[in-house]
Image: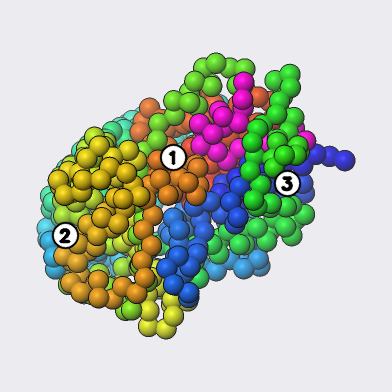
């Protein structure tokens, strides 16, 4: 009997790889340590019965536009996938009552700008977006292997020429602030777009961070956002159903304790006291955990050292709220946006990142306030709402409090105080919010890691995306296509190129390479 392909973990990359492989007739066995599959793409009743909260990922736009969905969209729909399109994807709450909002209606977007020059610059970017996103999307959709990468570079040069290719390369190395200063005049607009950089560990002055604010701004304008009906786990449930329909298995409460190898080749895994033979293994693991499961190592000292030294981003704290009604934003239009970033300036964002990197609890953390039940009433009882709040960025190990108010330095004692700090910041923009709270659930960075060890220190990205750890260097130079020194063992997940998010690129690349 042919041994199955074993996949360690059931995050979105792992499930996408398994679903694609089973669709190609491969036998697949997914092993998940948690009681339910999905990794960061899960939905649970965290506060009160009837209130469904996305535990981590909420925005499914990258998944909806992924190569996997292009290939398997009809099958996913047959297995229950249901998505909700949103025409007002994101906004920025600035001074109370003031905001910037990006809508698929360009005139609505531009009505929140204050500068005619910025309106003209925005229209110019929209006109250039199809050509530029083709190049950027082509890069993000290219495995970091010699052949595909060479073809991408050749095609890009043919399309853009030498000057255009160099301009693109320079843009990929530009910081958010440098790009925003060169593009816009209004500090409000700069703040609104810089907030997106912190989603991927790019503070305003970190090189290489301009790409994400650019893609979210233009992508939000052109296409809006997508969330899951009933919760982000609509993706997970459909993927599991697709895997099982293809003859694969997803086993939960199954913690892998070792990856076995012999003669430089993968031979199987140890799980729950038993052994499973496999000559092909996909490991959806943070690099340090892959190194741990390899025991004596891979046989390549440089590779092993790089896994151990892989750098994680600062932590994130989550706050889930069950509300008796919609958020009473002073700027009433904010009630109709999927995301509301709360942060007053690009300089405040830079300060927040510096504080977290110094081990300090930020005095004014950036808040990403998700309002999914505004667009998907199935997530809460009639007339009620769920609120999804990311508190970015916070240190995993606390050395102090930038505000000088919180004296504790251990997260079990700190998380409720930080939750109150976040609520204070929202209350400045939405007086009366606290009176609407029916239930709350605070999740510290260490809570996130305890539930999902891949989120080291509460790093929801599974690794910083700074230039020294991106592109050809993600997760290890010389192994950016996911292969390892152990024949048959492949790396997948957010720690691998093309990185974090719900696009599941590394899982899809690995499945295609194996198939």
Q: Quadrant of the C terminus?
A: top right
Q: Which mark is residue 28?
A: 3
Mark number displayed over residue 94: 2
Say left or right for 17 vs 124.
right
Near mark 2 (Cα within 10 A), the count class, few <14, some 14-19 or many ≥20, is many
Check contact, mark 2 vs mark 1: CB within 8 A: no
Of callouts 2 and 1, which one flags the residue occurring earlier in the amino acid sequence? 2
Q: Which residues are magenta?
A: 277-296
Residue 363 visible (yes or no): yes
The reply to whether residue 144 is in sight is no
Q: Earlier in the sequence, mark 1 or mark 3?
A: 3
Which residue is at a point 48% across and 68% down the rendered structure image?
45
- Where is 47 relative to 390, above or below? below
Q: Pointer 1: what residue?
A: 456
- CB under 8 Å between callouts 1 and 3? no
**Residue 461 drawn at (x, y percent):** 42, 43
């Amino acid at each position: 009997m042919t041994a199955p392909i074993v996949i360690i973990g059931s995050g979105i990359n792992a499930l996408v790889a398994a679903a694609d492989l089973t669709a190609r007739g491969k036998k697949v066995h997914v092993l998940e340590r948690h009681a339910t599959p999905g990794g960061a793409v899960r939905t649970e009743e965290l506060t009160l019965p009837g209130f469904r909260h996305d535990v981590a990922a909420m925005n499914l736009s990258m998944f909806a536009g992924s190569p996997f969905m292009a290939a398997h969209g009809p099958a996913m729909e047959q297995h229950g996938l249901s998505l909700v399109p949103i025409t007002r994807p994101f906004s920025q709450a600035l001074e109370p009552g003031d905001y910037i909002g990006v809508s698929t209606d360009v005139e609505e977007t531009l009505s929140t700008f204050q500068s005619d020059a910025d309106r003209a610059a925005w229209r110019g970017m929209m006109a250039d977006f199809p050509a530029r996103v083709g190049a950027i999307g082509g890069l993000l959709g290219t495995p970091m292997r010699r052949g595909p990468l060479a073809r991408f570079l050749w095609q890009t040069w043919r399309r853009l020429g030498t000057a255009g290719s160099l301009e693109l390369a320079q843009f990929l190395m530009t910081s958010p602030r440098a790009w925003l200063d060169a593009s816009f005049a209004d500090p409000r607009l700069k703040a609104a777009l810089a907030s997106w950089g912190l989603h991927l560990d790019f503070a305003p002055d970190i090189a290489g961070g301009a790409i994400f604010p650019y893609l979210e701004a233009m992508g939000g304008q052109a296409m809006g956002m997508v969330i899951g009906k009933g919760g982000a786990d609509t993706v997970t449930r459909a993927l599991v159903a697709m895997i099982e329909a293809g003859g694969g298995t997803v086993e939960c409460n199954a913690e892998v304790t070792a990856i076995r190898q012999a003669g430089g080749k993968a031979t199987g895994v140890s799980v729950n006291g038993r052994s499973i033979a496999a000559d092909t293994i996909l490991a959806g693991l943070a690099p340090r955990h892959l190194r741990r499961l390899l025991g004596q190592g891979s046989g390549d000292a440089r590779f092993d050292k790089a896994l151990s030294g892989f750098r994680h981003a600062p932590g994130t704290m989550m706050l889930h709220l069950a509300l008796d009604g919609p958020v009473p934003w002073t700027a009433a239009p904010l009630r109709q946006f999927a995301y509301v970033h709360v942060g007053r300036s690009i300089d405040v964002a830079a300060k927040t990142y510096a504080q977290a990197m110094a081990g300090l609890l930020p005095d004014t953390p950036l808040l990403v306030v998700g309002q999914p039940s505004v667009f998907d009433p199935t997530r809460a009882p009639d007339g009620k709402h769920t609120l999804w709040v990311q508190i970015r960025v916070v240190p995993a190990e606390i050395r102090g409090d930038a505000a000088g108010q919180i004296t504790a330095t251990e997260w079990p004692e700190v998380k409720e105080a930080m939750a109150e700090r976040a609520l204070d910041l929202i209350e400045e923009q939405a007086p009366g919010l606290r009176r609407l709270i029916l239930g709350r659930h605070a999740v510290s960075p260490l809570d996130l890691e305890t539930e999902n060890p891949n989120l080291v220190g509460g790093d929801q990205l599974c690794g910083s995306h700074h230039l020294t750890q991106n592109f050809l260097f993600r997760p290890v130079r010389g192994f950016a296509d996911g292969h390892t020194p152990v024949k048959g063992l492949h790396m997948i997940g957010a720690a691998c190129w093309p990185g974090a998010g719900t696009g599941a690129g590394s899982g899809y690349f690995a499945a295609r390479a194996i198939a």
